[in-house]
Image (tube, grey):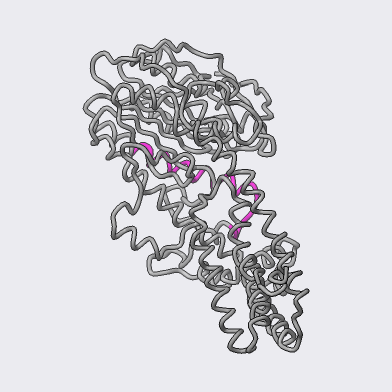
Amino acid sequence: MTWWKRWHLYLLLFAIYPAIAFLASNAGQVDPRAMTRPLLFSLVLSLLVLLLLRAILRDWSKAAAGATMVLLVILSYGHIYAALKEAGLSGETVVRHRYLAPVTLVALAAGIVLLARAHLSGSAVATLNLVATIALAGPILQLAGYYWPQLVAAGHATAPAQECTLSVVGDTPDVYLIILDAYERDDVLLEMHGYDNSWFLEALEARGFYIARGSLSNYRHTELSLAATLNSTYIQDFPERFSTIPNHQWEIVQRINHNSLRNELECLDYATVAFESGVFWTEWTDADYFIQRGSGGLDDIRSLGRLSRSDIVFLDTTLVRVAFDAMRQESGSNGRPRLDVNEEYRDRIQFVFSQLGEVASLPPPKLVFVHILSPHPPFVFGPNGELISEGDFETENGEARTLRLYADQVNYLNQRVLEAVDGILSRSRVPPVIVIMGDHGWADRNSEDKLSILNAYRLPGVGDAALYPTITPVNTFRVILDAYFGGRYGLLEDASYFSYETDVFGFQLVQNSWEP
């Protein structure tokens, strides 16, 4: 084991730790591929500091220890800054970059001076190797616990085999499913936010939509709600799928992509169209048309120099936050802050809306799936699309402002939705089927609020006879497949289940108290 005392593995382990820990703490929300640049940043930084200290200290062993010290300070500065602010230290105290950063750098320089005079024994190297190994083991085990079941489930990531029993009589309508994440029901919007959404609902009705004004989602969580909607089945009834163990949960998530609706319509030679969403497990990247920004070669090259939201959030945990915070306070030539962590988020939503109205021009028939991660926070749009920056949000806290920001974002999304619907209708040869719905609610007053959703249907040539105010999404495509494609699904009893983040499958049945 002499190599354990001679090889300074701890430098490498501590270099990759921040990116691995960041990914582990955001498992399921951040695509692992998004950690490529943060990981390279840490590794290149560690190499450069190592070479610099080797030139100064004339000793590889001390240079490795010093580089580790520098690396840990640089990569943890943002965490320290945030922790001190959360502890209540604010105002003209050390928790200002102008004070904290110099103090941190002086302390680091003092540590390097002491290290230059110290002797680093083989036992010290072995101890550092052990500490780094134990530290890295935590997030690796956490990631293994999350992703290993996904690998196990990968071989089962298709919807249950089924015969193609449906048929089409006459013209085949395009089918659109537009998910507006966390879009609440109009009565909750009025009671909780003071926002009257009647103008939008009336505008939809004028365009031929039926509004299920008393609708609840079937589940509180996006992954469960969408899986149930797209498979027209309650999670509890997924054959041999439902279980609280992680791999079964991931198999449920997989059925957002590989679902019975898609299978049924592809049997009828429907093409699939999908958009980037920013949530990798709701992106149908294998669709016939997967629409995303930067699909051209030149755009791909340009994107290499653009920081993603994940990049910025990661770098905010490091000493780079000093520069980032300064950039947030300055405006560029376009009037935006020079750095905005939500810029990519905002641009993605704008891009989807800009393309959605054009999709009708693609050859029919087609199934179009759209998941827009809004009005769910972060709040990035004012009531008419005005820029809401991270800095603006932090200047005024409180529940009242949060409720207003949500309502403002709803108001802007309404305008874009109507524009998209008009574009779809004007470009469609055959009147299309359009469903616009929230996957769950957002207000936290009670569990019923958390399940209340916008739920709007445009079913041309069929009418509203099969619809009713309290219909839930599990019955959405049962109605549509029966009406347009000769299906024999029938309706399930509408039920809605609330569960907590810490116990996703701990379902509590929620009664719908809506009254006309």
Question: Looking at the image, which is closer to me, 411 or 353?
Answer: 353
Q: Give the vertical position of 251 relative to 239 (above or below).
A: below
Q: Indicate the quadrant where residue 314 lies.
A: bottom right
Highlighted range, magenta: 394-419
In magenta segment, residue 411: yes
Q: Give the vertical position of 394 relative to 494 (above or below).
A: below
Q: Which residue lies furthest to the right in this view?
A: 123
Q: Indicate the quadrant where residue 91 lies.
A: bottom right
User: Is residue 493 left or right of 269 when viewed as pictured?
Assistant: right
Q: Quadrant of the N terminus?
A: bottom right
Question: Looking at the image, which is closer to me, 279 or 193?
Answer: 279
Q: Give the vertical position of 256 relative to 402 (above or below).
A: above
Residue drawn 61% across and 64% down? 317
User: Is residue 451 left or right of 201 when viewed as pictured?
Assistant: right
User: Is residue 171 left or right of 175 when viewed as pictured?
Assistant: left
Question: Looking at the image, which is closer to me, 33 or 183?
Answer: 33
Residue drawn 66% across and 38% down? 501
Q: Quadrant of the C terminus?
A: top right
